[in-house]
Image: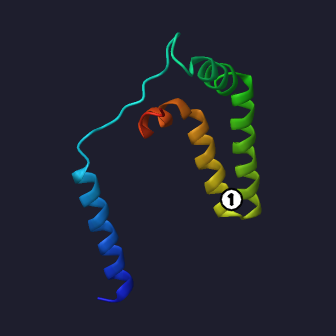
Amino acid sequence: MNSKKRNGMKIAIFSLGFLAASSNAHAFKALTTGDMWYEFYDIFFTKLLQGPMGATLTGGTLAWGLVAAVRGSIPTFLICTLAAGVMISLENVVQTFGYIA
């Protein structure tokens, strides 16, 4: 085996060991009224990202990616498509990453 394959295997084994050793799962649930960061959460997620501004940003990112694909820039197309997918389901992505505070 060459050194690149060995290094890749070491990283994979370390990552799997790290995941197996972590015993606590931290989940982030949506904030409710009275929580410390509720106002920020309400303005940012509910009013901006799930409203018309979020739809405009997501549509613009998808359009930019399609233009990049037509021009032959596949990496830009992939990045824009991935970013638009994250923007569409941002609340689920935040909950998946775990708790914030």
**Toward which corner of the image does residue 62 lie, by quadrant?**
top right
Estimate the x, y position of residue 8 in percent, counting from the top left. Answer: 35, 74
Estimate the x, y position of residue 68 in percent, counting from the top left. Answer: 74, 57
Q: Secondary structure at mark 1?
A: helix
Give the residue at x 47% y 22%: 30
- The residue sitting at the top extreme is 33
**Residue pointed to by mark 1:** 76
Mark 1 closeness class: few <14, some 14–19, many ≥20 residues within 10 Å: some
In this picture, residue 93 sits left or right of residue 2: right
Estimate the x, y position of residue 49 in percent, counting from the top left. Answer: 66, 28
Amino acid type at circle 1 is Thr
Query: Is 24 rendered above or below residue 71?
Result: above
Give the residue at x 61% y 56%: 78
- The residue sitting at the bottom extreme is 2
In this picture, residue 17 sits left or right of residue 100: left
Q: Nearer the viewer, residue 82 or 74?
A: 82
Q: Nearer the viewer, residue 98 or 74?
A: 98
Q: In the rendered view of the protein, which quadrant contains the N terminus?
A: bottom left
Query: Is 74 rendered above or below residue 95?
Result: below
Count every numbered label the image shows and give the total: 1
